[in-house]
Amino acid sequence: MKTILITGSTSGIGLGIAREFAKTKQYNIVFNGLEPNGPEIAEGVGKEFGIQVMFSPANMMKPEELKKMVDDAIVKFGAIDILVNNAGIQHVSPIEDFPEDKWNAIIAINLTSVFHLTKAVWKGMKERKFGRIINIASAHGLVASEFKSAYVAAKHGIVGFTKTIALEGAPFNITANAICPGYVKTPLVEKQIADQAKAHQMSEADIVNKVMLYKQAVKEFVPVEVLGQLALFLASEGATTLTGTALPVDGGWNAQ
């Protein structure tokens, strides 16, 4: 059994990815999140699919907690074979009104935590000559949208970081790839809809149809199961030569 650690995995995209890995019954899963019922969520998935799980409430803004999460997972499972950096937050605001604390939090959670966790698992992956780093970036890691300066900066940073560690990891059978989703119907996006409606002074229905999905050729939210299935492939032995990529799953947004 390999072990996968997924940040932000007690809701949204992270939980969807965890469930796809759990269905295979081939992975131990380290769950992470700040939901008060996080341990129950992790335990529920473990019981549903008959796999071993662990939960950590590590805060992405606290590097010492991230290191402890990795150490605790290694004590329990022996190794971390796959790291999925998924945790993220969002804030929508014109640049002149963008709160500095929101900028700092978004960069810390969406980008800097990826560095700390990758560094923490890297030595073990090199020693075992196997590792898979899967970073959940965004279509906004490839293109920009107004009112999202911190988020776009962080996600572009993830794409660059992914390329760098792909080069460093190649001699050791460590791959690194970024998945760049379009809009996925998650709690984070639900909040974005409300924030965008306020920023654009439009109804929430118009935000979905005229702002968010307007940029996608396929006018549908991306199913979280699709992201999980792609992550499964990237984690597999068959993906050894697929590294350093930023893979858009965005309904054709980036085809324009």
Image (cartoon, rainbow, N blue to C red):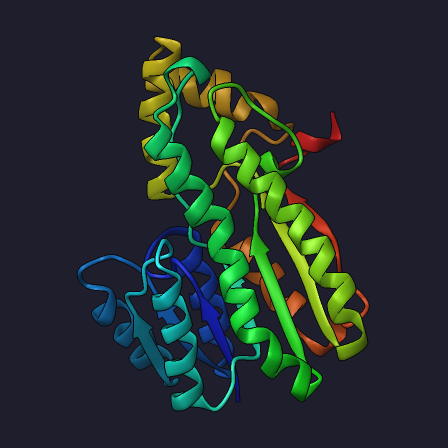
Residue 163 location, x and y as percent? 73, 54
The reply, left or right, for residue 132 in relation to residue 148 is: right
Q: Is residue 79 visible?
A: yes
The reply, left or right, for residue 82 in relation to residue 161 is: left
Question: From what the image shows, is residue 233 above or below residue 223?
Answer: below
Question: From what the image shows, is residue 90 above or below residue 127?
Answer: above
Q: Quadrant of residue 197?
A: top left
Residue 253 location, x and y as percent? 65, 30
**Residue located 39% across and 84% down the image:** 51
Question: From what the image shows, is residue 221 above or below residue 205?
Answer: below
The reply, left or right, for residue 236 in relation to residue 172 is: left
**Residue located 36% across and 75% down the image:** 68
Q: Is residue 185 visible?
A: no
Q: Quadrant of residue 156?
A: top right
**Residue located 52% across and 57% down the image:** 114
Tell which of 228 and 6 is nearer to you: 6
**Residue located 72% across and 78% down the image:** 237
Q: Quadrant of the C terminus?
A: top right
